[in-house]
Image (cartoon, rainbow, N blue to C red):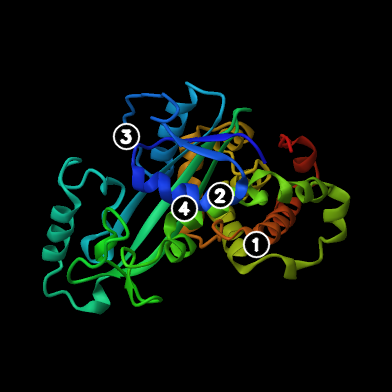
Amino acid sequence: MQGRIVFATGNAGKIKEIRMIMEDTGMEVVSMKDAGITADIDENGKTYEENALIKARAVAAFTNDIVMADDSGLEIDYLNKEPGIYSARYLGEDTPYSVKNANLIQRLEGVPEEQRTARFVCAIAAVLPDGRELTTRAAIEGRIGYDEKGKNGFGYDPIFYVPEFGKTTAELTEEEKNQVSHRGKALELMKDERFHGEAVCTAQQLRTPLLLKNLEARGDLIPIALRRLAAHDREKDTQYCETLYHYLTCCHSLKKTSDALYTHRNTVLYRIRRLQEDFAIPLEEPSQHADLLLGVSLILFDTKGPDFFLSAPQAEV
């Protein structure tokens, strides 16, 4: 693979991490500064995905390269998931992380270990030269430590303890961190061919009403989570099954999904978030996407009939 990825960040530590993760793609990864791009970006989104897309779109206006951006945050359960999407701006953007970390440790003073659960969350957004927009999200679970440990990371890494390794993310080697980190996982998902259309090739076959007719009696092919989703759609007159179908067949493109549903992209973002958080639909697991697509197609074949698949907008693959 050849080409260049412009990553919408000026954080040298982050760029170093991203280059290591993306090395096997054969693509050059450069920062905005390296690409000679300056942009005044107002990150006013309400989710990690929205903020990542805001940054990626802003930089994409200046280049024909692939543009990627991330938005990440630390969510501490005891603090109602603070600082969350405001992690970078917590206590002020120019405040040293040593001060931010000390403040969070102080706020958790006296809190027992089992209640110090937390996670790093990262959303990656990509704007491709053909206009497609892709997003992925991943997380790493852990706990907040009692003091700073380690020199290998940046940001909140020194206070984020990973039980799996018995040390903070700032104590992990670069290789260890890239294997388990929220950013590493989200980038791996973005690299996965299934996010670029490979799985959607099978979707073309699944759209064939005849095939679905032959599988109509195979209720065992519909996961329990999708059965609950379908029941919610029936009871509340919602469109979560249709949203899931189009999101999967549109290569996770929010724009194409919103176009297919004739609704605003923010509505799609809201539904995708609910699919993951309220209905436990495993969109972060690419290995399950084919099963999800087959299951939701069978549900829609039953509820909407074969005409749905003949009239539904087709994704370009």
Badge 3 or badge 4: first in the primary sequence: 3
User: Which mark is nearer the camera, 3 or 4?
Assistant: 3
Which residue is under mark 1? 287
Which residue is under mark 2? 23
Residue at position x 27%, y 61% in the image = 151
Badge 2 or badge 3: first in the primary sequence: 2
Kind of residue at badge 1 = Ser
**Residue 71 visible from this viewpoint:** no
Secondary structure under tag 4 reads helix
Badge 2 or badge 1: first in the primary sequence: 2
Report x, y in % for residue 41.
Answer: 34, 28
Q: Which mark is residue 202?
A: none
Vertical position of residue 289 compared to residue 163: above or below: above
Report x, y in % for residue 253.
Answer: 59, 39
Vertical position of residue 143 compared to residue 4: above or below: below
Q: In the visual, does 44 lie left or right of 126?
A: left
User: Which mark is nearer the camera, 2 or 3?
Assistant: 2
Q: In the visual, does 281 lie left or right of 85?
A: right
Cα distance between the residues tagged 2 and 4: 34 Å
Report x, y in % for residue 13.
Answer: 35, 48
Which residue is under mark 4? 274
Secondary structure under tag 3 reads loop
Q: Which mark is residue 44?
A: 3
Pointers 3 and 4 in contact (C-beta within 8 Å):
no
Cα distance between the residues tagged 3 and 4: 20 Å
Kind of residue at badge 3 = Asn
Residue farthest top in this picture: 62
